[in-house]
Image (spheres, grey):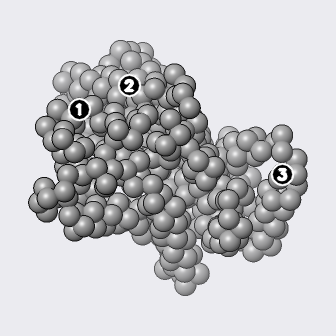
Amino acid sequence: MKTTSSASALPTSPKENISTKNVPKGAGWFSSTTFNRMHAFGLFAFAIFVTCSIAGAHLSLALLTLCVAVQLMRGREGETESGRFWGGWKLGIEWPIIAFVVIGLVSTVISEKPFDSFHNMRHLLTILGAYAVAHSLLWHPQWRWPLLWTFMLSATAFSFFGIGEFLFGVSSKVQSTQGTTMTWGAMCVMFLAVTMQVAWSGIVRRDRWLARIQIVPQVFAMLLSFVRGAYVGFAASLFYLMRRYWSNRRLLLTRILPVLLVLILIAAVFSPETVRQRVATIFDLQTGSTQVRLVQWRHAMTIAADNLFFGVGWRDLAPVLRQYAAPDPNLPESVTQDVFSIGHFHSNYVTLLVCFGATGLAAFLWLMAAVWRRLGAAAKLATEDGRVIVDATRAAMMGFLVAGFFDWTFGDAEVVTMFWFVIGLGLGQANLEKS
């Protein structure tokens, strides 16, 4: 089977990739079963910690990245020179990453707070998660569904944990182990999209039913976070998934709509009145938090116009805003306080425009478009169950991008780390034997 041009940047042959059977024998500890176990430990620990602990996620990502780098540098049998590394690590999204990083560094250098901006640039290292997870799954296809289930079950477990805290009065909103409800809500969007896709389209009936059971606590964990951006992002994920199956009326009527109707009924009966009130405020422009966003975005356009190409750097934007605007006496005091004290602008796109200028925002959009295309290329090389995971990944990405219109999720370490994990999960579904 010939590979389409859109998939050309993905690995296209087992000879061009490293697998456990091609690691040189007798090459010492790094080719042993112990090394593979360490590799698997780093990968599966990453899948667990990404739902509950940023420290654990980054430590396991460091171990996983080390394992992948060692395996890349060793290459296949007879090609152990380090030059093999440079030909094997690409996923096809490198140029937009380079552009985004370079623009970010230029913005940092010319910023009034270069050290602050450079410190925040560390968040871009989480992109390693996409590479480490994708390559791990390309080399070890047998890890794909176990990894997916590890991620889903961990998300469900910590959803139960957050709901328990809420029910016992430990917290007034569900945020599980996260520091803020916005962080937890944005994470819910992604793992809910993955679980929903498996519940609808899992190849094995048992998988579909296990996923449907997990949807219930995950949905309530999101609803009780009271994060409206998460509600909108999840709705976008659902729309994307339903659109994928719109032409298949049998599947739509027998699987998708029944699950949705039962879920809506359960949520309507058991959700507190405060959830319905929160949903209603999505369309109310007079809500305090909505006014905060509208005021910030209006002032952000002025700041961006004065720093059009490279922005002000990745820094606390509250002092910048205070240089450009004064409090409006016609606004409620609570709104004014949030407008001038919160160090971001409650939107990935507005905040990136101010921090990195129009060039930085364009590079970010290029990167997202490139990731979307690469997922499409992976789907063309995937098995049937692999395409289920790729569609889940795209749905999660859709939710992340839409929720990002209303919250600064790209600057949230927990959220963006999960985002790149999910992207790696999708890019790792290419079936090398099909090419």
Residue closest to the eye, 142 or 417: 142
Q: In which quarter of the image is residue 286?
A: top right
**Closer to viewer: mark 2 or mark 1:** 1
Estimate the x, y position of residue 139 in percent, counting from the top left: 37, 50
Under mark 1, the amino acid is Trp
Q: Residue 252 carries which label?
A: 3
Q: Nearer the viewer, mark 3 or mark 1?
A: 1
Q: Which amino acid does label 2 sit on?
A: Pro
Whichever of callouts 2 and 1 sits on the residue coming sooner in the sequence is 1
Mark 3 surroundings within 10 Å by alpha-carbon count, few (fewer than 14), some (14 through 19), many (20 or more):
some
Q: Where does the image place residue 241, in percent across and percent down from the top left?
A: 70, 46
Q: What element carries label 3?
A: helix
Instruction: Say what amino acid the circle numbered 3 marks.
Output: Leu
Seen in the picture, residue 368 relative to 130 is either above or below; the reply is: above
Residue at point 70%, 56% (across, down): 201
- Frontmost of labels 3 and 2 is 3
- Which of 196 and 428 lies nearest the eye of the viewer? 428
Which of the two labelled residues, at mark 3 and mark 2, occupies the earlier sequence position? 2
Q: Is residue 386 visible?
A: yes
Cβ atoms at labels 3 and 2 below 8 Å apart? no
Q: Which is nearer the eye, 174 or 78?
A: 78
Q: How far apart are marks 3 and 1 (CA)?
A: 45 Å
| Vertical position of residue 104 compared to residue 405: above or below | above
Where disc 2 sits, the SS reads helix
Q: Pinpoint residue 388: horizontal percent, then vertical percent.
A: 62, 51
User: Badge 2 local density, few (<14 within 10 Å), some, or many (20+)?
Assistant: many
Q: Residue at x 68, y 59 (%)?
A: 203
Q: Mark 2 points at which residue?
A: 96
